[in-house]
Structures are given as C-alpha cells and as structure tokens.
C-alpha cells in the first residue's frame, strides 16, 4: 500500500501509470551497474520515481569525473566509493526508498550473488568486457537489461529482453577497446541516462513500448535521434 | 551494371566526411563489406577508419533502417547507415 505521503510525492506520475504502477515501482529493485556519467542520472531519476536501487561500482570519484558524474561532489573526491557517495545523496533526496550497494568489480564469480533478486539491470558501464558479463547473467536469469553507452556528443541505447531480443553480444559482437580516456560531455550522459531511467520505468510499470529490438542512436552534435531495427 | 546506394553517416563518420548523406554509384549486387572498401577509395578521409568486424570493430551498419552484417547484399536504392559503436559510460 502507498502511504499518503507517497500518493502526494508521486502524484504527477501516478497520473501516468496509476497507483498500481507506483506500487510496482515501490516493490521493484533496479541494479545500476556503474555509478558514473550514465549511472548518476539513472540512479537520480529512478530514486525520484520511487524505485529501490542496487548501486554497483568499485571506484572512488576523481576530479576529472565531475564534469558528468553529478552524484559525486568535491567532498567525495578520492574518499567515498561511488556507490556510497551516491547513496548518501539519494537517501537525503528520497528517504522512502531502499538503496543497497556493492563496492567492487563484477566478476563471473560474484555476479550471481551481487545481482540476485533485481528486476531490471541498467548498464552504465564503460567497457564491453563487463557488459558481456551482465548480458550473460541477464540471459541466465531472464532479467531485462537496459544498455547505453556514450562518447562525446553521441550515444546509443537499447533494451535487451532474454528470449525476445538479440543479446547484447549479438548486437555488438566486437567493440574496439578504447585506449585511455575518451571525450564526454556531462549533458550527453544526462540525455542517455535519462532515457535509460525511463526505459527501466517502462519495463516495470508496463507503460509505453520499450526499445526492444531497436537501437536508438542519439547524435547531439547533429540533432538526430535515429531508431534502427535490430531484428 | 551499376546501381545507386545512399550512404548516411553518423557521429564521428559525419564529422569526418562533413556531410549527412551522399549517393554512390556502385557495381550491382555488391556486399556491405565491398561498399565499405569503395567508400575508403572515394572518401580518402575515411582511410584511417578500420571498418572491421573483428576485435577492431569500429562500425555498425544498417540497411533501410535494419541492422545488417558485412556479408549482406545491397540492391539499387538501398540506404546504408554507418555508425560507430561507443563504449563509454
């Protein structure tokens, strides 16, 4: 049951998916894997919507992260691991949700234990090696996986549903390993991260049509949103 | 025989060639990978792009809005889009 406070807090979105949709969000848990440029807006908007979170990352924020990783502040630099840094702000933002954390790197050994019981996985990682690990786990357990990646003013997003769509590895069988640092603007990660958060909410509440079998390509330099059919 | 295909560039590729799309006359029935070779010849600024599918993969291709592999054949009037997969987060 939603409390009176929750009915008021989520009033504007209950207008979209009803109290039933809000109940679903309240009873769900989403894994945000990577709490950086994408993970910050994803976790922020999911917390705003009343979704319980699992935040996964092994790093501590660095100064050069702050142009995009908006959940981490100067006081967190080199000090608070990203999941804890984000958890602290998000708990002050929405005290009604539950936020679990895992500080460490996902491996084939620990992924089953770490992601146990999550309803949706949101891929906010910066490398395909770990993405393939998420993909494999998602298929083993039948959990939807919302993928996005960004670089510069450009990004891609698609939703993988085991049994319904291609796997992430089938869509991106090989991606050239980036050497060193890549260019990125905070706003680009903000756009793609906001899309990922909406995608997760669509999956949980059943509203709209998720980006299944579709790759949305966002090119902010050239003002284009292009949907490519993956089937 | 000659056919016409339209090539649309995204992201980095668009910055490199400086146009959104352009039409090419190519031999009839060629495969995607052959089109990529032709592109490198006619657009020397793309010569440093690998256009590979192996571990150096740096391009994804769609034909008429659908994802295709490098072995897919092209037909007259096809619209081929090239976009680089990105990996940052």
Image: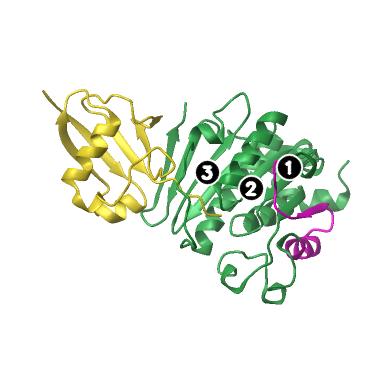
Mark 1 residue element: helix
**Is the residue A184 above or below the residue A112 in the image?**
below
In the drawing, what numbered circle is on residue A162?
none
Disc 1 designates what residue? Answer: A111
Mark 2 residue element: helix
Residue in front for this viewpoint, B16 or A104: A104
Q: Chain of mark 1?
A: A
Check the picture and name the quadrant holding the N terminus of chain B: top left
Alpha carbon separation for disc pair 1 and 2: 22 Å
In the drawing, what numbered circle is on residue A157?
3
What span is in magenta?
Answer: A84-109
Tell me, by letter, which chain the rendering colours green: A
Tell me, by letter, which chain the rendering colours yellow: B
Disc 2 designates what residue? Answer: A197
Q: Nearer the viewer, mark 3 or mark 1?
A: 1
Q: Chain of mark 3?
A: A
Q: Is residue A164 left or right of residue A112?
A: left
Report crowding for label 2: few under 14, some 14 to 19, many 20 or more residues within 10 A (C-alpha): many
């Amino acid at each position: 049951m939603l409390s009176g406070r929750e009915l008021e807090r989520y009033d504007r979105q209950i207008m979209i998916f009803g109290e039933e949709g809000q109940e679903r969000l309240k009873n769900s848990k989403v894994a945000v894997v990577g709490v950086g440029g994408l993970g910050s807006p994803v976790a922020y908007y999911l917390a705003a919507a009343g979704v319980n979170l699992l935040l996964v990352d092994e790093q501590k924020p660095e100064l050069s992260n702050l142009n995009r990783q908006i959940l981490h502040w100067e006081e967190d630099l080199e000090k608070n691991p990203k999941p804890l840094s984000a958890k602290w702000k998000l708990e002050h933002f929405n005290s009604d949700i539950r936020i679990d954390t895992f500080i460490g790197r996902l491996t084939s050994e620990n992924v089953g234990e770490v992601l146990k019981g999550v309803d949706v996985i949101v891929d906010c990682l910066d490398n395909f090696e770990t993405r393939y690990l998420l993909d494999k786990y998602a298929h083993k357990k039948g959990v939807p996986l919302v993928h996005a990646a960004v670089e510069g003013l450009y990004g891609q997003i698609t939703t993988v549903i085991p049994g319904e769509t291609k796997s992430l590895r089938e869509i991106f069988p090989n991606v050239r390993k980036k050497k060193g640092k890549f260019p990125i603007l905070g706003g680009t990660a903000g756009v793609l991260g906001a899309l990922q958060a909406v995608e997760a909410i669509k999956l949980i509440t059943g509203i709209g049509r998720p980006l299944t079998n579709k790759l949305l390509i966002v090119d902010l330099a050239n003002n284009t949103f292009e949907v490519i059919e993956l089937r | 025989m000659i056919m016409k295909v339209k090539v649309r560039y995204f992201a980095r590729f668009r910055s490199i060639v400086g146009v959104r799309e352009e039409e090419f006359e190519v031999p009839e029935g060629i495969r995607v990978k052959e089109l990529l070779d032709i592109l490198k010849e006619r657009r020397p600024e793309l010569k440093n792009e690998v256009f590979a599918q192996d571990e150096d993969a740096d391009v994804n291709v769609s034909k008429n809005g659908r994802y295709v592999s490098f072995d897919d054949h092209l037909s007259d009037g096809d619209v081929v889009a090239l976009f680089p997969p990105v990996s940052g987060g």
